[in-house]
Image: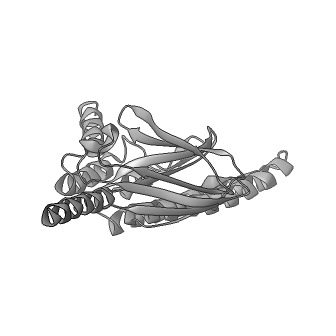
Amino acid sequence: MKKLLLLITAALLLAACGDRNTSVVISGDIHNGGNAKMTLALITADGLEKIDSTNLHDGHFEFKISSENELIKERENAPMMFQLFLSDDNSIATMAKKGEKLKITADAQDLTKTYRISGGEEALLIQQLDSTLTGFIAVADSLYGIYEKNIENDSVRADIDAQYMKHVKSHRRYLEGFIAAHPNNMASYIAFYQSYNRRSFFDVYQDLDVLKQINANMSKVYPESEYVKTMTHIAEMMESRR
């Protein structure tokens, strides 16, 4: 009887360890967040699927998504994209694989601009992309302020336009380098679709070959990922319209 109880206990412990190894845990501390409500959603090919929500406890939150959750149960061990919301216009988008534990710190006033993350390679790379875009926006906003103050000065406006286009090209080169440096990481999709003020740094038609190369790389690593399948379908549609 004692042996049977020991076997049952061991089996339960193994099952619990197995769940920890395949679940996704996202936790963190949000400064100035008080007890605000944080919502977690999975970004799918069809849109957002809410997973859970919780109130911050003195700024702290934690989500544990079990591998048995219907939204992720059938997904392979490819990165999944999640979005955390304090509100519709104050959120963080990130990626995690089964078994990863992401830890986030941020300021509730502006999650995207202030967050830092650890616990996953894709998550860290996306944070780097977001941080670099924040720097790009700061310079762009500064140039726009000068432009507005000199709206009637043609020479100054022309100079600001030239500086802005140079700034755009510089950021584009950064994104190209990022994609080249991380050929097997799904964060490359985030780099390809990064945009500012409704302007994308890559054009899905003119830069279709870049997207196709990302798809080719990702198809080798994550052939069953819905994101890869969706991006491959988009590239095929764009190719047919050329």
Work out whether 88 lies above or below 64: above
User: Which quarter of the image is occupied by the N terminus?
Assistant: bottom left
**Quarter holding residue 220:** bottom left
Residue at 80% from the left image edge and 55% from the top image edge: 146
158 relative to 224 in the view: left or right: right
Q: Is residue 175 left or right of residue 35?
A: left
Residue 125 vs 207, above or below: the answer is below
Give how far across and how far down residue 17 sits, in percent: 28, 62
Look at 23% across and 57% down and name the residue there.
Answer: 217
Q: Which sits in the foreground, 125 or 162?
A: 125
State the image coordinates of residue 191 (x, y, percent, origin top left).
43, 55
Q: Is residue 106 visible?
A: yes
Q: How is the image coloured?
A: one colour
The number of discs equals 0
- Nearer-the-camera pick, 60 or 129: 60
Q: Position of residue 180 (x, y in %)?
A: 33, 65
Asked whether, in this view, residue 58 is left or right of residue 211, the answer is right
